[in-house]
Image (cartoon, grey):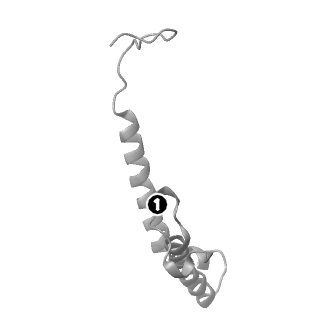
Amino acid sequence: MPAQQGTAPLTGPIPKRSTFYLITAATGLNAVVTLGLRAVLIELLKAEGLSPSQALAFGSVLGIIQVSARAIDFMCGVAGGMPPRPAWLRPQY
């Protein structure tokens, strides 16, 4: 297929899959860090001077916030290929 008028043909080496490997590595590292943070969050909060009951409360709130954010995203999110909103959340005209 000839190049269109006013454009230069593509020359040079074809890019390798380095972007795929970079995204894969970043996703894997994110999972490891997130998992590790959840495992030691209460101990880190205790080391910062919070009492054990306060550290447990803050650790528990993190889970509640994550579940709430997912619920809000499920109910209200339509962009990015999300499923449509339930009928009771759609505007009534």
Residue that sits furthest to the bottom in the current view? 53
**Residue at the location (45% across, 73% down)?**
39
**Residue at the location (61% across, 75% down)?**
91
Q: Residues within 10 Å of mark 1 (few under 14, many from 20)?
A: few
Label 1 SS? helix
**Residue at the location (47% across, 64% down)?**
34
Q: Is residue 44 left or right of residue 3?
A: right
User: Is residue 43 something one can see in this rendering?
Assistant: no
Q: Is residue 43 left or right of residue 13?
A: right
Q: Measured from the top left, where is residue 70 in percent x and y? A: 50, 73
Q: How many marks?
A: 1
Residue that sits furthest to the front in the current view? 93
Q: Is residue 8 above or below residue 70?
A: above
| Residue tagged 1 | 33
Q: Measured from the top left, where is residue 48 in percent x and y? A: 65, 74
Residue that sits furthest to the right in the current view? 49
92 or 1, which is in the foreground? 92
42 or 70, which is in the foreground? 70
Q: Quadrant of the N terminus?
A: top left
The image quadrant that residue 60 belongs to is bottom right
**Residue at the location (50% across, 79% down)?**
87
User: Is residue 15 something one can see in this rendering?
Assistant: yes
Q: Is residue 30 above or below residue 12?
A: below
Q: Measured from the top left, where is residue 22 in percent x and y? A: 41, 41
51 or 83, which is in the foreground? 83
Q: Quadrant of the C terminus?
A: bottom right
Q: Measured from the top left, where is residue 40 in percent x and y? A: 49, 73
Q: What's the amino acid at mark 1?
A: Val
